[in-house]
Image (cartoon, helix red, strand yellow):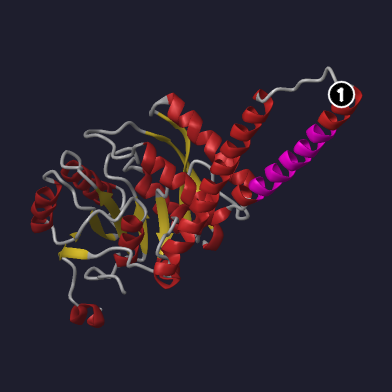
Amino acid sequence: MKAERKTGLKTVSILIPTYNEEENVIPLSEEIQKEFHTKLSGYDYEIVFIDNDSRDSTREKLREICKENKRIRAIFNAKNFGQFNSPYYGLQQTQGDCTILMCADFQDPVDMISRFVEEWEKGYKIVVAQKTSSKENRVMYFLRSCYYKIIKRFSDVEQIEHFTGFGLYDRDFIEVLRNLKDPTPFLRGIVAELGFRRTSVTYEQQKRRAGKTSNNFMRLYDAAMLSVTSYTKIGLRLATFVGFAISMGSVAIALVYLVLKLLYWDSFVAGTAPILVGMFFLGAVQLIFMGIMGEYILSINQRVMNRPLVIEEERLNFPDEKERERQ
């Protein structure tokens, strides 16, 4: 896809995934437009919202702003396709010379857009935003830090700490995403594994402006496990090592028990308690590692089924195929 160039300028695409963001989409679109009018007047732009089946008035608000400005576009998903598929699909639908992915709740500062473009013009194909601090809950920030360090330690691919996907991607990298055809994409890992020359820009993550986050324990767990199953072997290797260690320990305990029994044949009474405790312990270990292996199998299954990333219900202000061919 080529960018619209009515002005003959480079086009910067802004992609914003939404889910129940009725209080944020209008002020965010206004702030982005102001950023281009004041700091990036030498660039054309498009703002693309991809809505993941919001249950509030987000879509009505998007219709309003799309009607007022034809550079603002929207994709309405037929249902909620998850926190990874929707943004990944949206990136593939942008038409600019570069695309900036940012969240809709103002946690990603709008004034970072001009900083991204400045680095892009220096020749970097990818500009990632890395959090140095956050105004979110301190416990959550600490847990995220631990998670990033663990993944980085055990991953086969270099991982980027405190990178949420917020950043700029050149059109060449967007083309890589289009050709990848991954039904369960993990963008943060793909950037580290397949990305071009990149640089990072640090920032402090802001508090959500309005509304409630859709992240809960299960969504965070999904993100963690997708990263683990896609880029590490630690789960399977750990099962092997722990199994080997327990088996060696069991043999040692059995030998000790045998020696004590032979030496103190009449007086040695072990009882059934140690056996029961051992059985429960081994059963728990087996269930844990069966669950870990199940996560890997689930990841394989999802990729084998090769379902589409997203099914669209409607799109607004996008050029039709004939217009695209003329661009």
Q: Which residues are magenta?
A: 237-255
Report x, y in % for residue 143. 49, 31
Does residue 245 belong to the magenta stretch?
yes
Residue wearing tag 1 = 265
- 138, above or below 68, in the image: above
Image point (62%, 29%), residue name? 276
Does residue 49 belong to the magenta stretch?
no
Image point (51%, 46%), residue name? 291
Which of these two is toward me, 271 or 161?
271
Q: Is residue 125 visible?
A: no
Query: What element does badge 1 sit on?
Result: loop
Name which quarter of the figure residue 106 lies in. Answer: top left
Q: From the viewer's perspective, tell me whether residue 56 is left or right of residue 50.
A: left
Image point (34%, 66%), residue name? 92
- 245, above or below 117, in the image: above
Report x, y in % for residue 218. 37, 41
Report x, y in % for residue 84. 37, 54
